[in-house]
Amino acid sequence: MTGPVRRFRALPIRARLSLLVAAAVAFAVAAVSVTCWFIVQGKLYEQVDEDLKKATVLQGPQRVDEIRSALTDCTDTPRDSAGGFQYTYSQVVKEDGTVCLFPSSVGNVEVTASDRKVIENAGAGSRGIFRDGTDEDGDDVRVLTLPLVINDPSTLTSTHAAVIVAVPLKGTQSTLNDLALILLLVSGIGVLGSAAAGLAVARTGLRPVDKLTEAVEHVARTEDLGVRIPVEEESEDEIARLSRSFNSMTSALASSRDLQQQLIADAGHELRTPLTSLRTNIELLTRSEDTGRPLPPADRKALLDSVKAQMTELAALIGDLQELSRPDPGHQAGRVEIVAWQDVVEAALRRARLRGPELTVTADLHPWYVRAEPAALERAVVNVLDNAVKFSPPGGTVEVRLADGVLTVRDHGPGIAADELPHVFDRFWRSPGARALPGSGLGLSIVARTVQQAGGTVALTPAEGGGTTATVRLPGAPTPPPDVPGVP
């Protein structure tokens, strides 16, 4: 059984659908044909039985004379005679098994045990039986056996017998055979037609799948993600949903590839500047050593400080790129946990105060618990604070407030132009006024990514009186869930 199933599964979908449709139709047609044949057979036999029943009522002088004639000239050999029963076979069977044919009978019907039982019960009111039988030549006949009581007035005795009448079934069987042949032909035509219809339906139904297959093969062969499968807007069937899903997938892949290429291009551009500076400084130091003309101590120290700064910038840029290239934490559920946001902000504030010791950083923090990755959330808050520290004037103030799940960081720097606000969270984007300052242009991109993954929002808006306000909103609660360990 495994072999045929495997061979069936190895067939194309069209062939399988055609075979399944043909098998289903064949089963239905066969069931209907067989049922029809048996119904017609039953109706024909009912008609024959009804005719036998109507024509063999043992009343009337003529029929009594037929019975007397058969008993008087008892013989089991057919005789040429006219009149009598209109049925072909007519005979009387005595209790001792003697068969006496009616003068009009043209044949002898074989007597069976059921006929003898009717004879035995003739005096008990037996009603007779219908049965299938054969004549002396073996031809099929339909038989009606009726009980008969023969009274002898001279001896005042009676004997039991039976009247057997029958008609040949040749015509009925011929009709049934013709019907069977017609049903067989109709069934065969129906099965072939259903197979052809199933193949046509399969081809029509699978045409969108063929287009989808061709599109997938084209993408695999050419890596062309611009392929789209046309879909009717009003269609909501499975094929349309599959086509829309494929179009969405290729669009997402194309967008992802474009972003990846853009990231590589931007990273290469950002890496070129510090690498060029490093190369220049190292070449100066190497040339000084090779020529035996040492640089003045002040110039040498400046070159080494520049090399150190460029290396620090490279390390920060590589770290930012690694952060952006990490998979979505949603696929790493074990790293996400309930975090006390006020503690994260407090830790970030300590780092920000070290980077801007000349600034005044005020904080008003209220408890708020969120579900996020602790290290990523702290890095995002640090980036927001670093941005505020970087653009604050010397001796300025940075105001930090956390309340009801909203973190606001306000600085008193030059602010951001209105036409630059839509780009502040783009990767590697830096405003014209910030390009001279250290940084990779990835800090706010990391903030936006982290906040979005935590289910929140982030925005930068101009502050009243100058400066910029960064607003971060995260869903959470002022108290932690009671079943979270490690959170007070």
Image: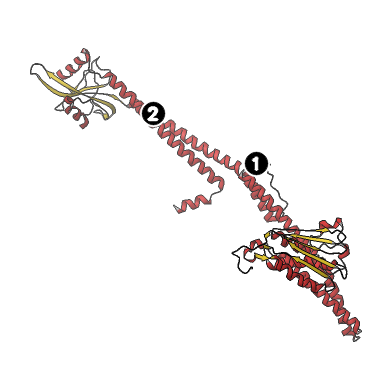
Dot label at residue 235: 1
Q: Residue at x 73, y 69 (%)?
A: 346
Dot label at residue 40: 2
* Front of the two marks 1 and 2: 1
Q: Position of residue 415 (x, y in %)?
A: 86, 61
Instruction: Tell whether 176 sits left or right of 106.
Output: right
Q: Residue furthest bottom?
A: 292
Q: Position of residue 442 (x, y in %)?
A: 78, 65
**Quadrant location of residue 219?**
bottom right
Q: Is residue 442 visible?
A: no
Q: Position of residue 243 (x, y in %)?
A: 65, 47
Instruction: Tell whether 439 sits left or right of 193.
Output: right
Q: Nearer the viewer, residue 326 or 106?
A: 326
Q: Residue at x 68, y 67 (%)?
A: 374
- Which residue type carries mark 2? Val
Q: Residue at x 81, y 69 (%)?
A: 361
Residue contact at pointers 1 and 2, CB within 8 angstroms: no
Q: Earlier in the sequence, mark 1 or mark 2?
A: 2
**Quadrant location of residue 483?**
bottom right
**Circle 1 — which element?**
loop
Dot label at residue 217: none
Instruction: Tell whether 144 sits left or right of 299.
Output: left
- Which residue type carries mark 1? Ser
In the rendered view, tell whether residue 240 sits above or below residue 393: above
